[in-house]
Amino acid sequence: METPIYIALSRQMTLRHQMDVVANNIANANTAGFKAEMLLMSEVELPSDPTTELSYVQDFATARDFSPGTLRPTGNDLDLAIQGNGFFAVQTPEGVRYTRLGRFQLNSDGILVTSHGYPVLAGGSSISLDPDDGPINVAEDGSISTDLARNGQLLQVVGKLDVVDFADRNALTPTEDTLFDAGTQAPTAATGKVAQRMLEDSNVNAIVEMTNMIEVTRNYQAVQRFMDAEHERQRRAISSITSNT
């Protein structure tokens, strides 16, 4: 197989991976707390004579767009969003993970958990709430209090959510759903503020992603047409050589 075919194949492989990323973004356009992905590509030069420049296309990583999504009011006391930078910390069987999705609930033991049942961390441990203590209030700094007097006069702070950030968000590794693993990176204090009775929508722009999908499809087809033409050129060349021998 000649070099032009290898180069075209490298482009097709990259485009297929890019299509997977775009399709995943579109599939999660309505997933609260989801952050869009983008494919990172580079040019790999091939050794050649000084008069010819040849290079492959290589995708080497995916990156997340951590720009905020739109905050949507829900009216649910345990729906929380972060205005600005920051992540909620949750305890999973594999260790502490971080998320922007604040769709929380109370389990049968009164512990604040995610929709998958993972405890939400406050001060490094889980937090218990008693619905009988009255309305649950969450301040901008993540402090959780209950209205024991049921008249807004007597508040009892029961804990403060761990809202953290990271110096290098692109080093976060997605695990399941909207959870991220920080690896060895230590969390820092977040500058974002907690908004109660809100959820952060996905930051995926569906129109942009559909446009990207069309562009990737057209580019893939263009490369395929080139490869078909190159195969036909080689076939004619071989046929001409064999007919003249």
Image: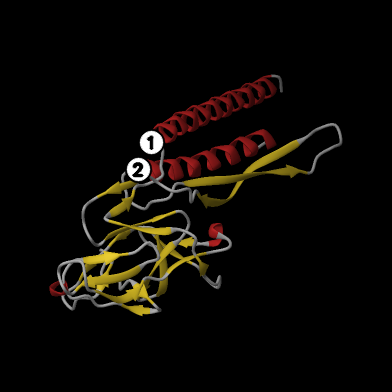
The crowding category of the residue bearing disc 1, from other C-alpha atoms within 10 Å (few below 14, some 14 to 19, many at least 20), is some
Determine whether 162 is above or below 86 in the image: below
**Label whose residue precedes the other's in the sequence (2 or 1):** 2
Where is the N terminus found, in terms of image quarters? top right
Instruction: Report helix, strand or loop for mark 1.
Output: helix
Q: Residue at x 55, y 42 (%)?
A: 14
Q: Name which residue lies at 44% across and 47% down.
A: 36
Rendered image quadrant of residue 154: bottom left
Q: Are marks 2 and 1 in contact (CB under 8 Å)?
A: yes
Location of residue 53 (image quadrant): top right
Amino acid, disc 2 = Ala
Residue 4 position in % (x across, y down): 67, 33
C-alpha gap between disc 2 and disc 1: 6 Å
Q: Is residue 13 left or right of residue 244?
A: left
Find residue 160 and report its horizontal and vertical position in percent: 36, 73
Q: Residues within 10 Å of mark 2 (few under 14, many from 20)?
A: many
Query: On the image, numbered disc 1 is attached to which residue?
Result: 206
Q: How is the image coloured?
A: secondary structure
Disc 2 is placed on an element classified as: loop
Q: Amino acid at mark 1?
A: Ala
Query: Disc number at residue 29?
Result: 2
